[in-house]
Image (spheres, rainbow, N blue to C red):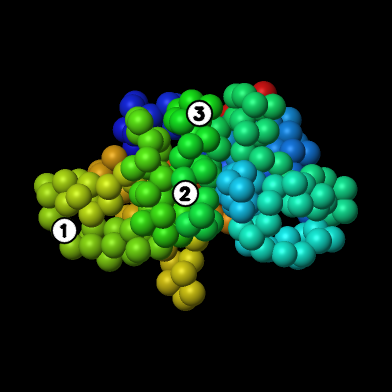
Amino acid sequence: MLANVTDSLPYFATSHPLVLAHRGFSLTGLENTMAAFRAAVDLGCTHVETDAQATADGVVLLFHDSTLDRVTGSSGKISALPARVVARARIGGSQAIPTLEELASKLPDVRINLDVKEWNSVAPVAGLIERLGLHDRVLVASFSDRRRRAVQKRLSRPVAGSAGVVGNALFVLLAPVVPQRFRASVMARLLPGVDALQIPERFGPVRTATRGLVHRAHSCNLQVHVWTVNEPVVMHALLDLGFDGIVTDRADLLMDVLRERGSRKR
């Protein structure tokens, strides 16, 4: 059973399970580029997972790291650089770093799972969601629950949100021991603004992606997405357990899995 959040939040009101293309789709390392996002859409993905970093002058870029060094030929901390300087960097030596506005405008039907990486990104991200009217197209995520909530509090109407590290831990630890009749109300108070849990398949030796977790989350009107899963056999196993979405680098393989299962049609 899918969580009832699909009834009230347009972000979720699409084909299920969700294929969340992790930093788009690229087999050649061009993560978080317009080429990767277009490739994901060409595969049939309705959702992409990406990361928000803001420049010193408040431009919201889609880039995972806080510095340019790992995937570009440039260096420097993004939050300390103006957008005009960052614009010279090239991912993989060829691709410009896209902005959130560019993705939203050039791929107007795609829905965006947006991981807000730094505190300096909070106000620019919220401002852009407001200006472009992206409320129905964005899920705000962050490892920091406070940072995610800070974005949501700046918005004029609700956007989907996912729990951070503390929020996920609270649910995993407390949901099994709270009586079922009180569970939804208790979790709603503990996890304000949360509509989805986004978790790894395992946390060290502990398996976190279980059928029990899905059942408890759905009883609290929450979806559950697992990251980052690239093996078809694991994809099948998670879908068998009822998970609502999978974050993957191999959107091509996950789309094949869903077609095989009859969950998607071309």
Q: Nearer the viewer, mark 2 or mark 1?
A: 2
Label pair 3/1, CB-CB below 8 angstroms: no
> What residue would you read off at disc 3?
131
Choose the circle earlier in sequence order: 3 or 1: 3
Q: Position of residue 202 (x, y in %)?
A: 48, 66
Q: Quarter holding the N terminus?
A: top left
> What residue would you read off at disc 1?
178
Residue nearer the viewer, 13 or 120: 120
Query: Callout 1: few (<14), some (14-19), or many (20+) C-alpha neighbours within 10 Å?
Result: few
Whether residue 109 is visible, yes or no, is yes
Residue kind at label 1, given as amino acid type: Val
| SS for callout 2 | helix
| SS for callout 3 | helix
Asked whether, in this view, residue 155 is left or right of residue 72, the answer is: left
Q: Which mark is residue 122?
A: 2
Residue kind at label 2, given as amino acid type: Val
Residue kind at label 3, given as amino acid type: Arg
- Asked where in the image residue 9 lies, by quadrant, the reply is top left
Choose the circle earlier in sequence order: 3 or 2: 2
Q: Which residue lies furthest to the right in this view?
A: 93
Whether residue 91 is visible, yes or no, is no
Residue 5 drawn above or below residue 187:
above
Label pair 3/2, CB-CB below 8 angstroms: no
The Cα–Cα distance between marks 3 and 2, rounded to whole angstroms, is 14 Å
Residue 71 drawn above or below residue 195:
below
State the residue at coordinates (76%, 52%): 85
The Cα–Cα distance between marks 2 and 1, rounded to whole angstroms, is 33 Å
Q: Where is residue 187 in the image (x, y as percent from the top left)?
A: 22, 51
Q: Where is residue 141 in the image (x, y as percent from the top left)?
A: 46, 49
